[in-house]
Image: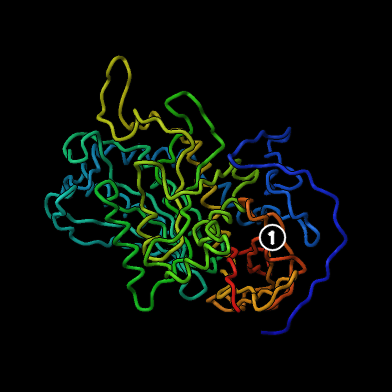
């Protein structure tokens, strides 16, 4: 600890009009920028206690480098990727792996070659590997021994053992999940997600940009439709490494190809972001979980704090998107590749389009009653996928250039007090990249951090605000303004 910083209470500020921005709803202003409010993360139903110190928590605007990255996202390249993946006929996990033109093996080899093209242009910054294993019959969706392969392109950052993962799954299916012969173009589910990973790898690995502090893995996994096998293998590969790979966040893009639902409703500037609450059993011990429940910290799990961060840095004029955070693991009756990462103890979230058309997911390609069924490229909106890629790009670049999250955050509960004493330790990568720490807070019923105060380069602070009435978080900020994910302090007595 360097020293303790006391913050005197300021005069009561004038009330700020409160608005809610989730579910996402917005209009562009006359300049084509996203209109914002004075208190962008405030909630009208959670207006007490009033803000008496600090200032409103504002979105983090893109740096010049990030703005350039987002400007280079090309809808035409995304369109070409989706159409190419659909051209392999089927990418079913059980389909042929020996054909050069059809099946999951051909798709895997093409994805590897694309990543390698970007690696060849990266001056050695990007490395590509296809890793995998043989999945034995599971008595369910894998009836015979099958090779599961993940294609992983890693951009190595300057910090040791810090990694962020962005992923889509390249396998596909049709109506019968066991039909590995018939066409299953899988344009939306999930060539769209793979296109996001490929496009971001192409841009961010370019030598025109500096290396980020944290490493980034751009991934395409297989086996999702048969049981999340590829993501499970990758998450366990990271978790079982020596030392354990410090995956600070995993972004899963699955079904991000169109904003239009089967009822005709379209939200072309909205992406849903699913974030699980309580960590899986086995990740957080019973004592920690009981403490979390007692302090009302179920909305401040690693996954949900990651989601809050993504919303803060990804809603801007450069992305022209709103991130509508959904506080649950996934949709009903569905699952995704973020789950194995959560089960391995890593923060992970899922991006999915705002409205879904089930005639174009998990369907045989056919015309029935005059209606076209099947997951075909013609039903994708490539400009929309490009905007989703920009959301991912904004999140990844901001995360990878942040100092990381403080560790071992605590709040002193040794005595009754209307002040709050917070302690924390530096991020795992140390304090070399930390310029200052910030304390954020919100009403216990508010969904996002509403207020913030800069407390300097310290590891302990006294805030003249009662811990009984708000939820606190502590985050680190770099000298160039990149903030990290806020972490919840747990009570110590």
Q: Is residue 488 positioned above or below 150 on the image?
A: below
Q: How packed is label 1: few (under 14 Cα within 10 Å), some, or many (20 or more)?
A: some
Q: Residue furthest bottom?
A: 2
Q: Residue furthest top?
A: 370
Task: From the viewer's side, name the closer residue of 86 and 145.
Answer: 145
**Residue 18: x, y in percent?**
74, 44
Q: Residue furthest right?
A: 11
**Residue 164: x, y in percent?**
46, 62
Residue 67 in sight from this viewpoint: no
Q: How is the image coloured?
A: rainbow
On the rendered structure, is 60 left or right of 73?
right
On the rendered structure, is 489 left or right of 190?
right
Write down the residue under mark 1.
469
Q: Residue furthest front?
A: 416
**Image quarter of the N terminus:** bottom right
Q: Is residue 452 positioned above or below 188 on the image?
A: below
Q: Residue at x 26, y 39 (%)?
A: 173
Q: Residue at x 77, y 58 (%)?
A: 55
């Amino acid at each position: 600890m360097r020293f303790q910083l006391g913050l005197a209470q300021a005069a009561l500020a004038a009330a700020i009009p409160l608005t809610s921005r989730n579910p996402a709803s917005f209009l562009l202003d006359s300049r084509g920028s996203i209109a914002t409010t004075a208190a962008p993360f405030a909630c009208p139903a959670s207006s007490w206690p009033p803000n008496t110190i600090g200032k409103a928590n504002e979105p983090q605007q893109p740096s010049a480098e990030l703005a350039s990255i987002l400007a280079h996202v090309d809808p035409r390249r995304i369109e070409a990727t989706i159409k190419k993946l659909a051209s392999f006929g089927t990418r079913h996990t059980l389909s042929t792996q020996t054909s050069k033109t059809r099946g999951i093996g051909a798709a895997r080899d093409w994805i590897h070659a694309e990543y390698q093209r970007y690696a060849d242009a990266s001056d050695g910054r990007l490395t590509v590997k296809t890793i995998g294993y043989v999945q034995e019959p599971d008595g369910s969706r894998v009836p015979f021994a099958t090779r599961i392969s993940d294609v992983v392109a890693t951009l190595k950052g300057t910090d040791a053992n810090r990694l962020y993962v962005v992923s889509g799954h390249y396998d596909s299916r049709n109506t019968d999940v066991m039909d590995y012969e018939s066409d299953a173009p899988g344009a939306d589910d999930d060539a769209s997600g793979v296109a996001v990973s490929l496009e971001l790898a192409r841009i961010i690995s370019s030598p025109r940009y500096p290396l980020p502090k944290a490493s980034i893995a751009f991934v395409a996994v297989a086996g999702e439709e048969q049981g999340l096998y590829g993501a499970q293998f990758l998450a366990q590969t990271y978790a079982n490494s020596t030392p354990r790979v410090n995956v600070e966040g995993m972004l899963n893009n699955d079904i991000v190809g169109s904003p239009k639902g089967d009822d005709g409703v379209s939200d072309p500037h909205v992406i849903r972001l699913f974030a699980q609450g309580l960590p899986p059993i086995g990740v957080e011990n019973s004592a920690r979980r009981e403490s979390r429940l007692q302090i009302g910290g179920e909305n401040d799990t690693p996954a949900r704090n990651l989601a809050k961060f993504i919303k803060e840095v990804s809603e801007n004029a450069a992305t022209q998107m709103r991130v509508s955070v959904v506080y649950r693991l996934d949709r009903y009756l569905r699952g995704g590749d973020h789950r194995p990462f959560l089960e391995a103890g890593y923060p992970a979230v899922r991006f999915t389009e705002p409205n879904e058309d089930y005639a174009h997911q998990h369907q045989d390609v056919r015309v029935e009653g005059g209606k076209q069924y099947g997951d075909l490229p013609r039903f994708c909106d490539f400009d929309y996928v490009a905007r989703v890629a920009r959301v991912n790009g904004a999140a990844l670049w901001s995360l990878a250039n942040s100092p990381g999250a403080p560790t071992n955050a605590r709040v002193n509960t040794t005595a009754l007090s209307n002040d709050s004493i917070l302690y924390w330790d530096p991020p795992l990568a140390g304090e070399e990249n930390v310029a200052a720490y910030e304390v954020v807070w919100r009403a216990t019923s508010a969904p996002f951090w509403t207020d913030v105060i800069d407390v300097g380069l310290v590891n302990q602070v006294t805030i003249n605000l009662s811990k009984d009435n708000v939820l606190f978080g502590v985050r680190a900020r770099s000298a160039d303004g990149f903030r990290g994910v806020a972490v919840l302090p747990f009570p110590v007595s």
